[in-house]
Image: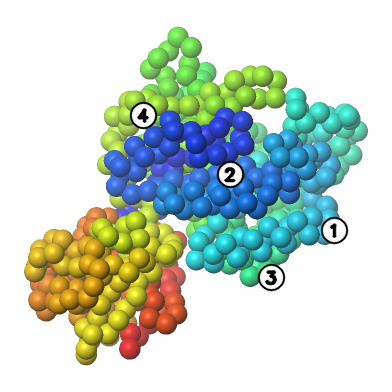
Amino acid sequence: MPSSYDWGMYNYHHPSGDEIDDMTDTAALANDDYWTANVGKQMSIYPKLVWWPAESWTSIKAWLDAAFSRGGEPLLMLCNSSVVGRWDNPRNWINSTWTSGSHDTALNTLIDNIKNYSLDHIVHIRFFWEGNRNVQLRPLPYDPVNFPEAGWYADLKNENGVQLNTPTTFKDAWRYIVNKFKTRGASNARFWFTVGSYGNILYNGSSILSQMYPEDVSHQCVDNLGYEIYANRITTNSYLNDPNITYTYPALAALNATKPIFVVESGCQSKPGDAAYKPAWLGNTLNPALIKAAYPRTCGILYWDDLSILGDGTKFDLKDTVAAQNMALARFGIADYRNGYTGPFLSAVNGGGANAIPNRMYPYGWEQFKLTKVSGSWYYIQSYDNHYLFEQNAGGAGITFEGTYGDIWNRVLLTRQTDGYYTMKCYDNVHFICAENGGETPINATRTSAGIFENWGFHNISGNVYNIWTKNYPAYGPRFQAMPTLSIIP
């Protein structure tokens, strides 16, 4: 059954290597498919470095489509660019340029496109990352090819040492952007506050993080927290004992007591002359038991499977093969990920025509079901592509969405309980539909009595379309403390 904490490994791809992201790197996607097949559920977050505002919505939308088509979550990383593929002058993105409205036209257009894309598809937004760095800009003229720079850091000075940003201006700019999303109705956006790990208490401890953190009682503008950590290759055999984390994790956790915390970037280069180093580092770093013991609020790792060429020509090779990942996984077993970061919403796999599993975090299209009354409390339940819920054998394990027309085998008896949840019985009026293993495997109909695994919540979206989730939702972690309103089925 699901873990009591949110947990998951996320393959986090910049597949093309130069951070102009695409979905054509077959090796990176093979790694992703390897994890999905072995874990039994899709866990990938697909980031796109958005050259904004230069990049077209057509390009951004294609990335969203690709991420959702693979069953993953898209994450847009906004970087300053007036030319696609090239960082813009950082002075054009200092905090005050946002609060003065200089970016409003482009920002409003982006927000409206995200909103209109589909409000039932969550789009993750990561901007102002590594904002806890102290940076002094290089002397002009600006050199975006060899020395790309960002303008959003909370302690940013110009080339003459004049202060451009402060933690207060950072907060103001962050709140301004998120408020734009909210006032324009883009309720499908989720915002990630992420910092770098620099091993310096001034820039990782309470000194600056607490000052620059933008959320308070009046400003609800952060959904997830995160920090970055890469292999040291000198003194550590995993991120668990990297001295940078001594400052970063506790300071980040102190900002909010309940928000999910991710390792938002992680990766390891091979160590010359030491073939065992990388598998050992990955095997320790990706081990959920070790991580939860050391940093208990960590929800998952977004793993950087990438080959990057830095501005000075340095190759930063984090690419892995399935074989390399398998060596790392052998240190603890991929099964540890099967019961982790997921959700309680019932999903018709691939939209229908196959099994149904209550393991989705967000109710997208595959998690929407059409209820049609047959008579009394008997209903047909149809999936996204109009396949009917189908019991293969009376009292058997097989519950699928593969029927193409309503018949006796497709009927479900819904009985409302006193707490607003429903039981679902198959056509034999004996066997209950069950969230097997608490919801981590396909539903079945093997139970003749109803417990928590056989109780289901229904929330009406519109007409006769509903989201359905298992009553076992508290086991999926703290983010599901507040579920949708329970509906009464007419």
Question: For numbered disc 3, what is the local secondary structure?
Answer: helix
Q: Which mark is residue 183?
A: 3
- Residue at 26% x, 58% y is 354
Q: Which residue is mark 1?
A: 100
Q: Position of residue 342 (x, y in %)?
A: 37, 55
Mark 3 or mark 2, whichever is nearer to me = 2
Would residue 431 be found to the left or right of residue 468 on screen?
left
Q: Position of residue 5 (x, y in %)?
A: 38, 54
Q: Quadrant of residue 474?
A: bottom left
In this view of the protein, which residue sits in the foreground, 165 or 449? 449
- Near mark 3 (Cα within 10 A), the count class, few <14, some 14-19 or many ≥20, is few
Vertical side of 302 occupied by 451: above or below = below
Vertical side of 263 occupied by 147: above or below = above
Q: Which residue is mark 4?
A: 322
Q: Do callouts 2 and 1 mark residues in contact (Cβ within 8 Å)?
A: no
Q: Position of residue 458 (x, y in %)?
A: 35, 76
Q: Amino acid at mark 3?
A: Thr
Q: Quadrant of residue 222?
A: bottom right
Q: Do callouts 3 and 4 mark residues in contact (Cβ within 8 Å)?
A: no
Query: Could you tell me how far apart the alpha carbons at marks 4 and 2 are, in whole angstroms?
Result: 23 Å
Q: Which mark is residue 48?
A: 2
Colouring style: rainbow
Q: Work out whether mark 2 precedes mark 1 in sequence or the reverse, and give the earlier one.
A: 2
Mark 3 or mark 4, whichever is nearer to me = 4
Q: Amino acid at mark 1?
A: Ser
Q: Amino acid at mark 2?
A: Lys
In this view of the protein, which residue sits in the foreground, 370 or 168? 370
Q: Amino acid at mark 4?
A: Val
Question: For numbered disc 4, what is the local secondary structure?
Answer: helix
Q: Quadrant of residue 291?
A: top left
